[in-house]
Image (spheres, helix red, strand yellow):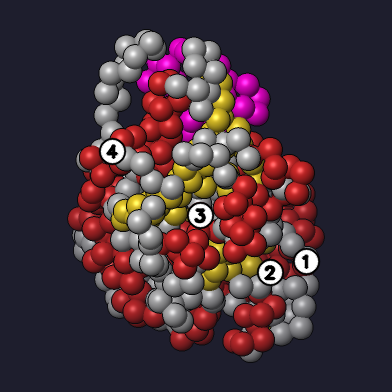
């Protein structure tokens, strides 16, 4: 597309997104699953339009604690990728030096009645992560974007059947509302890696595939993080050895009937789980000390909430600081834009491990089965995965999911072996290596 009065530029926009540039609608509502390219197409289209004439563009979401929570970085990245030198980037806004167009970034929940009035002159409002928008926010925003010819662009991955904006706009659209579903197979720029991930998910869990990759809402009652069939398949014997480094997850009992659990995992093979009751800090540290001496693990990830901090200090004082790593379940996730906390991030890594290929193996353990399959998932107001509170789960399960927490801890961070990156300790292990009967190690 060639633009007038601006530097020569050609940006390819997928056909399904051309109405963003060429058609006139009050509401342009795009939804679908992962890999559809909605955010990139919206960003590129707005940058193109803002180079043609002066526009006031508001990039909105339900909650924006900082500029990092917005699409600000995405727009900056696209400006850099396309070499758009006519844009000037500020700390909290973006402007086009030739047309005078301006991008601002706001969280709707943080707007009082005076701040929301500042949006009255907006030409285009882009609502990102629209599945998190509340009815209250929409009822305030909709009449505020009142300028003649103004548009509201909406991009979302549906969460539930009754997502407020879906019910208000897309479920029964009027003639001024364009609704388009876009998935990864509609996106000509979708990376091959994402297509492979989609196919893997389709083969392993059709329900997750429908939600994550096809943009379908979660089915009523489909709030379990880990499906039972995944765990049952992992119980089937298939692995006798692994060359991947040994990782130990240590979940330390906090009080009462909680158990201290050790999980021993080498890549795709969870070798063993052991649980103990009513141990003091020194006894737990002694067990970990013995496992280090006998098994030479590459890493021990341990819960340092509650009593765990004391065990960590003892092991560090004994000289194991290079092996042990302390983890708080409630701390900030490494991928903070996707997960509510480290607990959700580690448990989701277990789910991905169980659902990916080649197949994995768990020791047969009905208590572990109940632990893994009991937990419910939900999403916070930023669209991040969040797990039900551990106390809530304990009430339903009748105990703390200590074995599953120990397994999750083995996914706290990627582990490297001989300075060669591995994916959770298994990146360099081939399928044939994994199932070879020619290699054996001592059982323990």
Q: Are marks 3 and 2 in contact (CB under 8 Å)?
A: no
Residue at position x 68%, y 69% from top? 252
Relative to 193, is 163 above or below?
below
Q: Name the image quarter holding the C terminus.
A: bottom left
Which segment is the magenta one?
Answer: 72-94
Q: How many marks?
A: 4
Q: For residue 283, which numbered disc appears in the image?
A: none
Q: Are marks 3 and 4 in contact (CB under 8 Å)?
A: no
Spatial CA span between label 3 and label 2: 40 Å
Of helix, strand and loop, which one carries label 1? Answer: loop
Residue at position x 63%, y 40% from top? 120
Q: Residue 73 versus residue 150: which sits nearer the camera?
A: 150
Q: Name the image quarter holding the N terminus.
A: top left
Spatial CA span between label 2 and label 4: 55 Å
Closer to the N terminus: mark 3 or mark 4? 4
Of helix, strand and loop, which one carries label 4? Answer: helix
Q: Residue 79 versus residue 154: which sits nearer the camera?
A: 154
Q: Are marks 1 and 2 in contact (CB under 8 Å)?
A: yes
Residue located beneath label 1 in the image: 307
Residue located beneath label 4 in the image: 18
Label 1 neighbourhood size at 10 Å, few (<14), some (14-19), many (20+)? some
Q: Which of the 4 image quadrants contains residue 201?
A: bottom left
Closer to the N terminus: mark 1 or mark 4? 4
Spatial CA span between label 1 and label 3: 41 Å
């Amino acid at each position: 597309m060639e633009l007038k009065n601006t530097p020569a530029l050609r940006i390819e926009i997928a056909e399904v997104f051309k109405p963003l540039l060429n058609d006139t609608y009050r509401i342009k509502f795009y939804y679908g699953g992962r890999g559809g390219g909605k955010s990139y197409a919206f960003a590129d289209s707005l940058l193109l339009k803002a180079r043609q004439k002066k526009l006031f563009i508001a990039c909105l979401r339900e909650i924006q604690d900082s500029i990092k929570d917005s699409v600000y970085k995405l727009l900056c990245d696209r400006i850099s990728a396309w070499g758009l030198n006519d844009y000037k980037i500020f700390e909290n806004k973006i402007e086009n030096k030739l047309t005078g167009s301006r991008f601002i970034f706001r969280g709707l929940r943080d707007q009082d009645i005076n701040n929301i009035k500042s949006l009255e002159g907006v030409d285009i409002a882009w609502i990102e992560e629209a599945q998190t928008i509340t009815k209250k926010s929409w009822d305030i925003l909709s009449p505020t974007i009142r300028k003649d010819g103004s548009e509201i662009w909406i991009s979302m991955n549906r969460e539930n059947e009754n997502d407020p904006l879906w019910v208000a706009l897309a479920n029964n659209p009027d003639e001024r509302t364009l609704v388009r579903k876009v998935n990864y197979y509609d996106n000509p720029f979708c990376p091959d890696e994402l297509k492979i991930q989609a196919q893997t998910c389709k083969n392993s869990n059709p329900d997750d595939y429908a939600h994550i990759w096809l943009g379908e809402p979660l089915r009523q009652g489909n709030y379990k993080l880990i499906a039972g069939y995944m765990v049952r398949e992992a119980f089937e014997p298939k692995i006798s050895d692994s060359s991947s480094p040994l990782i130990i997850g240590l979940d330390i009992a906090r009080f009462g009937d909680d158990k201290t659990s050790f999980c021993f995992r080498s890549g795709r093979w969870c070798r063993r789980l052991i649980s103990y009751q009513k141990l003091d800090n020194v006894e737990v540290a002694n067990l970990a000390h013995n496992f280090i001496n006998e098994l030479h693990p590459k890493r021990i990830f341990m819960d340092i909430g509650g009593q765990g901090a004391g065990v960590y200090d003892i092991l560090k004082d004994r000289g194991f600081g290079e092996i042990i790593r302390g983890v708080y379940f409630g701390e900030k996730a490494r991928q903070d834009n996707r997960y509510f906390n480290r607990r959700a991030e580690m448990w989701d890594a277990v789910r991905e491990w169980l659902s990916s290929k080649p197949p994995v193996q768990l020791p047969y353990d009905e208590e572990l089965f109940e632990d893994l399959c009991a937990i419910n998932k939900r999403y916070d107001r930023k669209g991040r995965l969040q797990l039900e509170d551990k106390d809530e789960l304990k009430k339903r399960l009748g105990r703390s999911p200590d074995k599953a927490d120990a397994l999750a801890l083995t996914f706290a961070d990627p582990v490297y072996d001989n300075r060669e990156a591995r994916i959770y300790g298994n990146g360099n292990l081939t399928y044939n290596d994994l199932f070879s009967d020619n290699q054996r190690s001592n059982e323990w």
